[in-house]
Amino acid sequence: MITGKCESVPQPIVTDVFITDELDRRAPKKTDYLQEKLALQDIAARMADQPEEVLPRFVDLALEMTGGVSAGLSLYEEEPAPGVFRWQYLRGQLSPFNGATTPRDFSPCGITLDRNAPVLSAHPERVYGWIAEANIVVPEVLLVPLYLGGRVPLGTLWIVSDREGHFDSGHARAVTELAAFVGIALRMVRSEERLKLSLDAQAKTASATLRNSEEQFRLLVQGVTDYSMYLLGLDGRVATWNEGARRIKGYEPEEIIGQHFSRFYTEEDRQNGEPERALATAMREGRFEKEGLRVRKNGEKFWANVIIDALRNDDGQIIAFAKITRDITEQREARAALDRTRETLFHSQKMEAVGQLTGGIAHDFNNLLTAVIGSLEIAERRVSDASVKRLIGNAMRGAQRGAALTQRMLVFARRHELDSRPVDIPTLVRGMSEMLERSLGPSVFIETRFPLQLPWIKTDPNQLEMALLNLMVNARDAMPQGGPIIVAARSETIGAGQRLRPGSYVCLSIADSGEGMDDDVLARATDPFFTTKEVGKGTGLGLPMVHGLAQESGGALVLKSQRGKGTTAELWFPVAEKTPIETSVNEVAARPATIPGKLTILVVDDDPLVLTNMVAMLEDSGHIVHEASSAHEALAILGRESEIELVLTDQAMPQMTGAELIDEIKSRWPKLPVILATGFAELPPHIDPFQQVTLAKPFLQYDLQRAVSAALEDPKTRRVVRFRGRG
Ligand SMILES: Nc1ncnc2c1ncn2[C@@H]1O[C@H](COP(=O)(O)OP(=O)(O)OP(=O)(O)O)[C@@H](O)[C@H]1O
Ligand SMILES: [Mg+2]
């Protein structure tokens, strides 16, 4: 109000109306200001600590020093309204006008600053109507300029007296001195204010920055989609929800905020108090971390890595929990797949090693048995003593059982070359019935379930018989009380992306209702030498052999079993593409041997035992035999001895194999027949078993004779032709 009034007084002020130059002419009445100076010192001493508080004290002192009735400061303001004085720290009768403003121009204050010296004003109320209106009479005012250090004008310090002629030059000097202190105090107040302002501004900027970074952080958390991040209250209720949480758990923020977080747990975990335990751990230890199953809104379960962190305020009190959840389902699946692959790799490497070892042993063993069986056979014929004959027969049966075992080992070790041919399963199984009855005993009975039409498969029929025999013996052993063994077959088509190559297959299955296998036994059942049977009752080579046969035939063995529920072994074989029209060597071999008469034969084998045995067998049949212990030696003999009509060679020999020898013979003596004796090494790929006569080790004299006839037979006429005169 007052402000309005004083600013609304725009009358021109005539200087001489209220400014008098009398001051200098009035001699000082008082010269000693000792008391006042002491008071000034006292006030100034407190200035540094409380500049704001000492300012009114200075005004009071000015009153005391001059004996005025009212005093105050008119401080020049640039801001907010330039050229205006504001009345401050007013004392005495004019105090109600504290805070009023007066324009600089023509005011006694302005004149004081312009003159830069103390000024005496008389009756300013005659110019300022508003002072008059307040019924205040101002007979005389003494004004001194206030400066800052660098002579920057600040305003004036003024004192009003209640009578004309009161102030003298002594007052003016004393107040000017005081004004210097007021100036300093004002400067301090202002710089403090500025400092406060700048601190305020800084604080404001800082809090704006903080707000800004908080906002950015919130946006970041909000936008993260790979992690579910949210806050939980101490009661476990959801307080915030980010995009990741929405994506992973499926809830919209409005449907989940305020809900208890236990709803993300499985029913079982909830019952077990998992959610409460998690919060209690985070509360106690500051953090909880675990992997576990969680449930999405749609009920789907997923594997989650969960971290709950306790959040504390500045006093260290826990005020909330931060919860971070990661969906690790894919990661876990990948890890499990990797583990499985590693295990499979390890297993196959182990099998490979065992296979090599077994194959190596079986190879040597097979050669030994060839010699034993061959020699026993010849010896048996040469003795007439019945008791010796019986002993030899016994030794022969032992050797033959050893040979059967070697066969298994060789098939398992994939060292036995398969004599693969189209096979009709029902015919083969029926053909085995007598042998099965004998081997299995009366406790079990075999039931066959074959469709009317079943494609032929391609495999080695002899090996398949051995495989079926083992599977049925296993089935019988699993049913001590007896029961049915169901042998069934069905045709199947395998598409892309399966374990087997796409194509047509026949699945031959042998099922029993016996004791079955637990997971552990099932996993190891096809491992070589794994058996749960008593010592001496099982070799643990049965299933490995079946597995080896199925794989070598391009199929697979699948075992399905449950403890107490029985076992089904499925053998998958590829369907035979075509039945060969040409007569196979094996068919020839199946017919009785045509005895070709006396021949000159070259026998090649690096093993002296086998060599001696073969020579003995052939000589026993009446042939003339030449021996060679290597392919090179054989070639030398062939070059020398032109009467040789047939070569019988071993396949596995150092430096030059039997197959390589055959190639050489074919190029040099194309018409010379050769028999390849094998047993452990795979047939080289370029040797066609339908063209090349082979002899599987170990063999009897009869087998050898049949091979000799087959080798001499003309494939077209099937008549034995004698080969003479190689030239
Ligand atoms: N039909 C089945 N029911 C229950 N367990 C079986 C069956 N077939 C195989 N097994 C288990 O698998 C193991 C390995 O079988 P595998 O045929 O390889 O060797 P084996 O039968 O023990 O010995 P062998 O075949 O030399 O007589 C058996 O010892 C048995 O524990
Ligand atoms: Mg077995």
Image: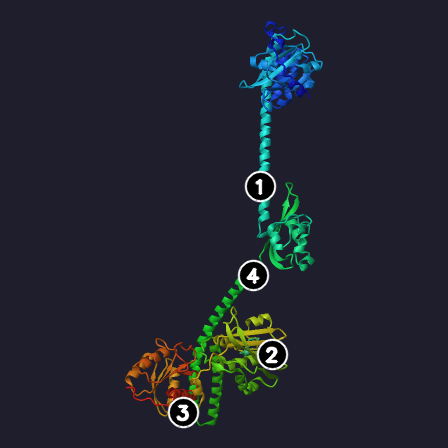
Disc on the earlier residue, 1 or 3:
1
> Which secondary structure, mark 4?
helix
Question: Mark 2 Cα within 10 Å, few/some/many (few <14, many 20+)?
Answer: many
Residue type (three-letter) at the residue carrying disc 3: Thr
Task: Point out the residue furthest to the right here.
Answer: 135
Question: Mark 4 Cα within 10 Å, few/some/many (few <14, many 20+)?
Answer: few
Rounded to the nearest whole Å, what is the CA distance between mark 4 and mark 2? 35 Å
Does label 2 point to a residue whose CB lies under 8 Å from ligand 1?
A: yes
Query: Mark 3 = which residue?
Result: 594
Q: Is residue 473 visible?
A: no
Label drawn at residue 333: 4
Front disc: 1 or 4: 1
Instruction: Tell me residue 213's x, y (percent).
Output: 57, 41
Looking at the rendering, which quadrant does residue 368 occupy?
Answer: bottom left
> Which secondary structure, mark 2?
strand
Instruction: Tell me residue 185's x, y (percent).
Output: 60, 20
Residues under numbered marks 1 and 2 in contact, where contact means CB atoms less than 8 Å apart: no
Disc on the earlier residue, 3 or 4:
4
Residue type (three-letter) at the residue carrying disc 1: Ser
As rendered, which of 724 and 3 lies closer to the eye?
3
Disc on the earlier residue, 1 or 4:
1
Q: Quadrant of ligand 1?
A: bottom right
Looking at the rendering, which quadrant does residue 520 occupy?
Answer: bottom right
Front disc: 1 or 3: 1
> Which secondary structure, mark 3?
loop
Residues under numbered marks 1 and 3 in contact, where contact means CB atoms less than 8 Å apart: no
As rendered, which of 474 and 333 lies closer to the eye?
333
